[in-house]
Amino acid sequence: MHSEIAQITEVPAGIERFARQLVVAWKAVLLYPPASAIPTETSEIAATTLREIVATDGEFSLSVQKNGLSWSGVPLKAQNSSFESFAVELYQRSLAEIRFHADADRASIATFLSVIATDSADIQAAGGIEASLTNAGLHGISVLEARVAIVDADTPTAAMHEPSVAEVDSLVSSALSGGTEDLRRLVRMVGEVNAAHAWLAASSTRGFDPMRAGDRVVELAQAAMRLPAEERSRFQQGIGDALLSLPEDQTAALLRDRLLPSARKDAAAATIVAAIGLDDLCRALVSPG
């Protein structure tokens, strides 16, 4: 599937530098007592770079993997033992994504890192990483928590929770009404193509209804418009992937009867068509029968 994200091959130098500084600040938090000035000083160095990035390129996010971080799907180059250890700590605390906002400062970074340095069992006992960061008064940095079970490559048969159709309907309704937290949960759901696929496929108790499924795609697209640009692009890509995961005849009917007509006058619907890409769009419209 073609998209602008697939064409990104290199992480900006400023973000690479910021990630390295973030690891240094994290190590300072681990090594020095809270009263020491060193963690604050190292956090200020990272905050200075962060301000430069946000001023030039806007807010951005880093995705968390088991042994590294990535930006827009591209792994950061700053890979060494300390960097990998930092990524593991984030991963073990169920972090899926970290978003850095315009109002982030050294206090934000210091608070974030001090919570990350807390034992993972204590974080879970406090209600999870999002709750722990909120309780610590964090500002300027937001996170997406991996609430779906994380499955390692060597345990592919582990059970995954998939939200019910009713749960997703509720999330979409709330997100369209301005519910920020439910919008974040919706982003996570769309990241799981199987869950999004199930929601689109269950368009009618009497069988697949391309108009109702198309309505759901448009609702997701409209919710996506509230996201920051980088996150919005990934979300739109996930919607397109879920749409193409339907049986070919259903995908073709959804596109032909609902999404393409809507895209002529609805900017949100048009973004999903663009995310699918011309080649995949043409292939999808030529379905058996």
Image (cartoon, helix red, strand yellow):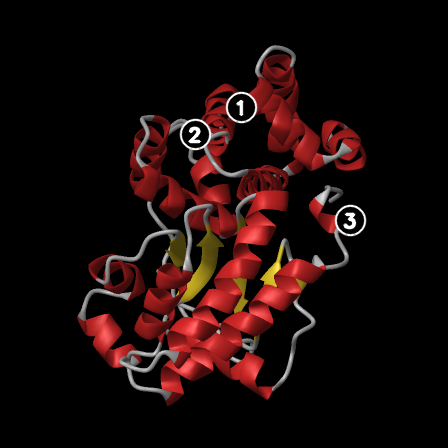
Are circles 3 and 1 on residues that touch, CB within 8 Å? no
Name the image quarter holding the N terminus: top right
Residue 168 circle label: none
Residue 7 circle label: 3
Report, in whole angstroms, how far the alpha carbon at label 3 lies from the one at label 1: 31 Å
Residue at the spot of label 2 = 203
Q: Is residue 95 left or right of residue 78?
A: left
Front: mark 3 or 1: 3
| Residue beneath the point at 62% across and 60% down | 15
- The kind of secondary structure element at disc 1 is helix
Which of the 4 image quarters holds residue 95? bottom left
| Residue beneath the point at 41% across and 62% down | 106
| Residue type at tag 3 | Gln
Which of the 4 image quarters holds residue 79? bottom right
Report, in whole angstroms, how far the alpha carbon at label 1 lies from the one at label 2: 8 Å
Q: Position of residue 245 (x, y in %)?
A: 60, 44
Q: Is residue 53 left or right of residue 199?
A: right
| Residue type at tag 2 | Ser
Residue at the spot of label 1 = 210
